Amino acid sequence: MHWSHAPVYWRAMSETPRSILQRVFGYHSFRGEQEAIIDTLLQGDDALVLMPTGGGKSLCYQIPALLRAGTAIVISPLISLMQDQVDALHELGVAAAVLNSSRSQSEQAATEQALLDGELDLLYMAPERLTRPRTLALLHRSPIALFAIDEAHCVSQWGHDFRSDYLELERLAGEFPQVPRVALTATAEPQTRAEIARRLHLDQARHFISSFDRPNIRYRITRKDKTRQQLLALLRREHPGDAGIVYCLSRNKVEATAAWLQQQGLDALPYHAGLPAEQRRQTQQRFLYEDGIIIVATIAFGMGIDKPDVRFVAHLDLPKSIEGYYQETGRAGRDGEPATAWLAYGLEDVIKLRQMLEGSGGSEEHKRRERLRLDAMLGLCELTACRRQALLQYFGEHDAPERCDNCDACLHPAPTRDATEDVRKALSCVYRTGQRFGVNHVIDVLRGGDTTKIRQFNHQNLSTWGIGRHLSTRAWRSIFRQLVARGLLRVDPEGFGALHLTEACRPVLRGEENIRLREDVTEKVSGRPRREASTLAEADQPLWQALRGLRKRLAERDGVPPYAIFNDHTLREMVASRPLHEPDLLRITGVGETKLARFGSDFLELIREFEYPDVESTS
């Protein structure tokens, strides 16, 4: 839909943020610091907003855009997703548009004229377009309500999603000193947070830091053990028919995994930057518009995805950082319903990531920071304590509870043991073999193997040969993985994964320190998350399915994703309260005046048919 086809709300002097929240967006109360952020922008002041994915960041600039004179300029990094966001706003009756290369020359000209005439509430564009001289000249001639810089962590050169075009956004402070600016992100530890403020000249801005907690997400991390079968078990036992994302480190693995899932009868599609643009567009459209699609992707997929009903995010490889892991897992459960974040990893992941890092063209300082990020990610994986507490502490929340009771470490604590003697054997074997070999060879020596490499280097004559026969290869791999995570060993990325001792291992080798390690156990199957079963009785299922069917038909008619009509939470409220009249429907979360006018009669008629099946429905 083009912007000119969307109904426009005329601003009234009596409008307030709360009335807009109710009338346009269909919500009855603000969450967290949303209202304070909105008030800050309405007063003309700047803001830096850190809020978790699904926390309602967009409302923080959309509501001021409807109340302040002029057009809000929203800077977003992904052109491919802007139109989806605009389409969702059109469904709410908001005059929004995009200005990017995907539009024809005539459409761009019409949008520019609408901006000049003050007919738009919001205009989306990419950072590289905004900083062009022609665009800046256009903006100087237009009434601007505010600038919203979304995914602001992209400005950090040390971050996981750095985009050089974002650095140019520092010009906004000087070019438009009277226009309030708000930078928003869901992912920024304290150092990145400070860099965002410095680079975008928001040091004097009011900072709003919400909790990073996503209590509806269940975090689960397990060792790799026939990873495809582990993934298949997760999908079939816990998420049959659910939409989700599977992340892989390489493009080849993305395509192979998607093809294998298709062979298992699952609707899985590959997505990475090397695929043709049209294929990527179609894949993204299917994910947004259809139910139950599984995307297998590199991290090229997901930023800005607004699909609220993603029920799981699975990682088949270790993410490079906790920031990346948090942002990627945050794409699950944006609707607040239960979701799963599942990760399988192994020591080979660490070796591969270290090799990639050292082979990159970054500076030594950049590499040092990335090593620290990778170490923190590995440390999260090897925790025996609450995963959520560790995540929150990483982002500066030091008052998090010791238990969340919604992660694998809390629900199924791994047993630990005094592994001091085995650790000393492992460290000694690394030393005796010359700190020149990877984990597989060291384990072969420990277990008394008779391999070509052992005979080649006469390692059968070492004092550590065969002293580890009492443990399986899997058990030794677990020990070495945990020693790398604890910093007692490091992996040499330039030496084919050779293990090296660190200074931290000296107290252990001297007998001055004991070590307790986690024992790897078979992952517990959590069972299908209790969502529909917990909120919908068997008798409610027919109405639930009928409402979903109606939503899908309306979405296809309007050319928008189903959730742009009403999300699942709204439909569940309809099932629970069975509204029969417009005032009743208006009280349901997500039903504002625009959607009531456009879709209310269809949904009310359907509900009446279920309530009074033998009576002809009337208005």
Image (cartoon, rainbow, N blue to C red):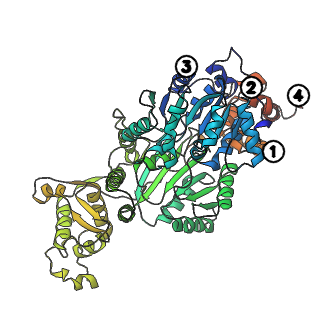
At numbered mark 1, what does the secondary structure look like: helix, strand or loop?
Answer: helix
Residue assigned mark 1: 557
Q: Between disc 1 and disc 2, whose residue precedes?
A: 2
- Distance of label 1 from label 2 (alpha carbons): 23 Å
Q: Nearer the viewer, residue 485 or 132?
A: 132
* Residue 614 vertical position relative to residue 83 in the rendered view, above or below: above
For discs 1 and 4, the disc positioned in front in the rendered view: 1
For discs 3 and 1, the disc positioned in front in the rendered view: 3
Q: Is residue 542 visible?
A: no
At numbered mark 2, what does the secondary structure look like: helix, strand or loop?
Answer: loop
Q: Nearer the viewer, residue 561 or 447?
A: 561
For discs 2 and 4, the disc positioned in front in the rendered view: 2
Query: Which amino acid lies under the numbered mark 2 shown in the image of this protein?
Result: Tyr
At numbered mark 3, what does the secondary structure look like: helix, strand or loop?
Answer: loop
Residue assigned mark 2: 9
* Residue 10 vertical position relative to residue 125 in the rendered view, above or below: above
Q: Nearer the viewer, residue 333 or 521?
A: 333
Query: Which amino acid lies under the numbered mark 4 shown in the image of this protein?
Result: Thr
- Distance of label 3 from label 1 (alpha carbons): 40 Å
Q: Between disc 1 and disc 4, whose residue precedes?
A: 1
Could you say which disc has been placed on residue 618 in the image?
4
* Residue 170 vertical position relative to residue 219 in the rendered view, above or below: above
For discs 2 and 3, the disc positioned in front in the rendered view: 3
